[in-house]
Image (spheres, grey):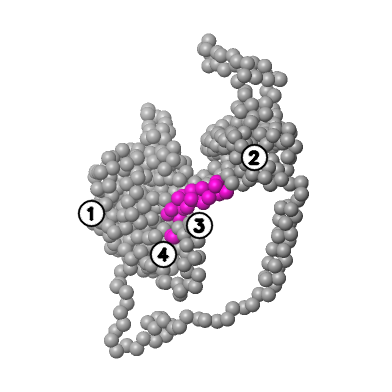
């Protein structure tokens, strides 16, 4: 098999005395869409944030595209990566947040072209051109010059997706992208995500949308208390959960 | 999104949702407030009485006030006051921003130094600091500047280096920096952490995050108290007269010392102070408006716009429905928690 896009080996993470991740081992293949489900506090979001080094892991190994996340191995010693390197690697991974986190003082287009301009050093013409195309693609061609607070939640989240895509990432992380949305706005965001999945984007998605997991997901992981309880294809896992904990969780959400 | 709903033919519109026919606007007789009138009359009478006393005070020579208001010596004092205010605020804002970033630094030595600076300069009166800088030559007759480990060193006479003007700038500016540091820090920590994370996730480095994402948003919190500080500085600069710097207050004191028109000259100075603070208040308003973009859906009206509206819409027509950006924007998400 080709180099996995994400490889986690016994990843551990604690906040103080609270162990949030207790040995996560999983591979995400290129072009794979992996969905993570589980009760709140199970460590799904934390694991996602470890992948782009927003959180440091305490033990285990985490690789993105064959390279260690946040460290460099020389001989048998690990060296922490310089801030510059961490940022360069983050720029290749897109992330979409539950609360959108758009920059409120910038218009939609300015949000999208900010990182290409200032992180990648693209020319304004190139960045604007791609920014316009991306906003068009998420259905917001008429909102280029609108500030985030004049957009609905669903529109804001679509701008946030366009902003992440503008960096032309090789991997997209979604942290409960529809959880802060009114129910009728969830669909428009999921549609964009489905489109991305069909185009072959590698995606790790923390979600409560079982229908999305079933239709667009290649793999489904159920996490609880910092471990992966069960993994499989969405169809199997949702229809035929093996573990007691999975059964009771699914009974509550489905 | 669906187009605006059309009624199916044959279906009778009913219930509260039906707004097809707008009912007549409510015309009711307002509640009477007699006590408002009574208090207003009493207050106006008191104010009028006070003004009358002042105006008729036999020893108060308004012609003297008018005369000195535009004399070159007073005006030159005014210019020095404005210079002091501008330079001391510039020093305060620049050093304050630096101290704020230092206090938030991960380096414990750096943040502690900043803490002690703020502690010391906020803990001693600005008047004491002004006198200290003015009299620095008592303890340090010469000042030396040099680059460590090199023979490059330069000595100077403290009295000539620390001019009254520089002593005033040091006293006012360094003191102001301590206050500005706290204002800037409050602005920085008021920006939601999610903003930093989103910027970091895009690969932005620390300084870039600060410059492009955090500070522009912090400005909204920083500007109003900074305006207050500037207005306050304009008046506090009168304390600099202790260093014999020829600013407005010192000028009027000198003039009053030989013509004995003490109250008249105080009024002259006060008029200029109040004119300047009024201009600053006005400027602050527009600055706040500029930095509010993207945070409120509709910018507040400027005083001029409000005045115009007051004139022409005295008998306000029923409010028009709020314009929608488009049919797709009918829902506004809740404010971020």
The residue beneath circle 1 is A199
Relative to B33, does residue B328 appear above or below in the rendering? above
Question: What residue lies at 76% left-to-right and 46% top-to-bottom?
Answer: B59
Question: What residue lies at 48% left-to-right and 57% top-to-bottom?
Answer: B304
Q: Which structural element holds mark 2?
A: helix
Q: Quadrant of the N terminus of chain A?
A: top left
Judge left or right: residue B29 versus residue A113: right
Look at discs 2 and 1 and give the one toward the viewer: 2
Q: Which residues are magenta?
A: B278-298
Look at discs 4 and 3 and give the one toward the viewer: 3
Q: Are marks 1 and 3 in contact (CB under 8 Å)?
A: no
Look at discs 4 and 2 and give the one toward the viewer: 2
Q: Chain of mark 3?
A: B
Judge left or right: residue A228 versus residue A144: right
Specify whether residue B297 is painted magenta.
yes
Residue B303's disc is 3
Q: Chain of mark 1?
A: A
Mark 1, Cα crowd under 10 Å, few <14 / some 14-19 / many 20+, is few
Magenta: main secondary structure equals helix
Judge left or right: residue B49 versus residue B83: right
**Distance between mark 4 and mark 1 Cα atoms:** 31 Å
Question: What residue lies at 41% left-to-right and 39% top-to-bottom?
Answer: B208
Give whichever of A228, A32 is nearer the camera: A32
**Distance between mark 1 and mark 3 Cα atoms:** 54 Å
Q: Are marks 2 and 1 on the same chain?
A: no
Relative to B148, does residue A133 appear above or below in the rendering? below
**Distance between mark 3 and mark 2 Cα atoms:** 32 Å
The residue beneath circle 2 is B68
Q: Earlier in the sequence, mark 4 or mark 3?
A: 3
Q: Which structural element holds mark 4?
A: loop
Mark 3, Cα crowd under 10 Å, few <14 / some 14-19 / many 20+, is few
Q: Quadrant of the C terminus of chain A?
A: bottom left
């Amino acid at each position: 098999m080709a180099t996995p896009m994400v490889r986690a080996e016994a990843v551990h993470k604690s906040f103080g005395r609270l162990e949030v991740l207790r040995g996560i081992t999983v591979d995400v293949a290129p072009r794979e869409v992996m969905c993570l489900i589980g009760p709140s506090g199970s460590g799904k979001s934390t694991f996602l944030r470890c992948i782009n080094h927003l959180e440091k892991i305490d033990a285990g190994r985490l690789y993105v595209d064959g390279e260690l996340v946040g460290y460099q191995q020389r001989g048998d010693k690990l060296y922490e990566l310089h801030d510059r390197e961490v940022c360069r690697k983050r720029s290749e991974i897109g992330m979409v947040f539950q609360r959108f986190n758009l920059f409120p003082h910038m218009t939609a287009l300015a949000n999208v072209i900010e990182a290409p301009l200032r992180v990648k050093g693209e020319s304004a013409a190139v960045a604007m051109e791609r920014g316009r195309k991306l906003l068009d693609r998420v259905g917001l061609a008429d909102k280029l010059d609108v500030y985030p607070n004049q957009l609905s939640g669903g529109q804001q989240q679509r701008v946030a997706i366009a902003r992440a895509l503008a960096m032309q990432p090789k991997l997209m992380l979604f942290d409960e992208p529809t959880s802060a949305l009114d129910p009728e706005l969830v669909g428009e965001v999921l549609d964009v995500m489905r489109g991305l999945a069909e185009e072959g984007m590698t995606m790790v998605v923390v979600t409560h949308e079982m229908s999305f997991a079933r239709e667009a997901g290649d793999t489904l992981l159920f996490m609880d208390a910092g471990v992966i309880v069960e993994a499989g294809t969405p169809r199997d896992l949702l229809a035929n959960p093996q573990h007691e904990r999975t059964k009771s969780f699914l009974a509550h959400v489905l | 999104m669906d187009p605006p709903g059309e009624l199916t033919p044959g279906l009778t519109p009913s219930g509260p949702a039906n707004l097809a026919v707008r009912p007549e606007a409510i015309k009711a007789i307002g509640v009477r407030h007699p006590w408002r009138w009574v208090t207003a009359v009493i207050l106006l009478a008191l104010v009028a009485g006070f003004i009358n006393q002042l105006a008729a005070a036999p020893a108060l020579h308004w012609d003297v006030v008018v005369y000195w208001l535009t004399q070159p010596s007073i005006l030159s004092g005014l210019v020095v006051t404005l210079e002091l205010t501008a330079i001391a605020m510039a020093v305060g804002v620049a050093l304050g921003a630096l101290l704020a970033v230092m206090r938030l630094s991960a380096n414990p030595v750096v943040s502690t130094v900043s803490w002690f600076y703020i502690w010391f300069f906020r803990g001693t009166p600005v008047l004491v600091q002004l006198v200290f800088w003015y009299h620095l030559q008592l303890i340090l007759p010469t000042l030396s500047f040099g680059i460590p480990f090199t023979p490059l060193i330069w000595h100077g006479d403290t009295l000539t280096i620390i001019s009254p003007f520089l002593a005033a700038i040091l006293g006012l500016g360094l003191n102001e920096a301590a206050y500005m540091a706290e204002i800037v820090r409050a602005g920085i920590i008021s920006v939601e952490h999610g903003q930093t994370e989103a910027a970091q996730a895009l690969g932005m480095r620390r300084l870039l995050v600060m410059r492009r994402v955090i500070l522009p948003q912090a400005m909204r919190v920083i500007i109003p108290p900074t305006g207050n500080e500037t207005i306050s500085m304009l008046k506090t600069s009168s304390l600099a007269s202790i260093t014999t710097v020829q600013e407005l207050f010192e000028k009027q004191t000198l003039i009053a010392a030989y013509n004995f028109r003490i109250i008249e000259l105080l009024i002259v100075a006060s008029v200029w102070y109040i004119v300047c603070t009024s201009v600053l208040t006005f400027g602050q308003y527009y600055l706040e408006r500029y930095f509010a973009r993207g945070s409120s859906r509709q910018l507040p009206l400027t005083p001029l716009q409000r005045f115009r509206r007051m004139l022409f819409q005295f008998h306000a027509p029923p409010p028009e429905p709020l314009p929608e950006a488009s049919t797709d924007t009918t829902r506004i998400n809740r404010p971020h928690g």
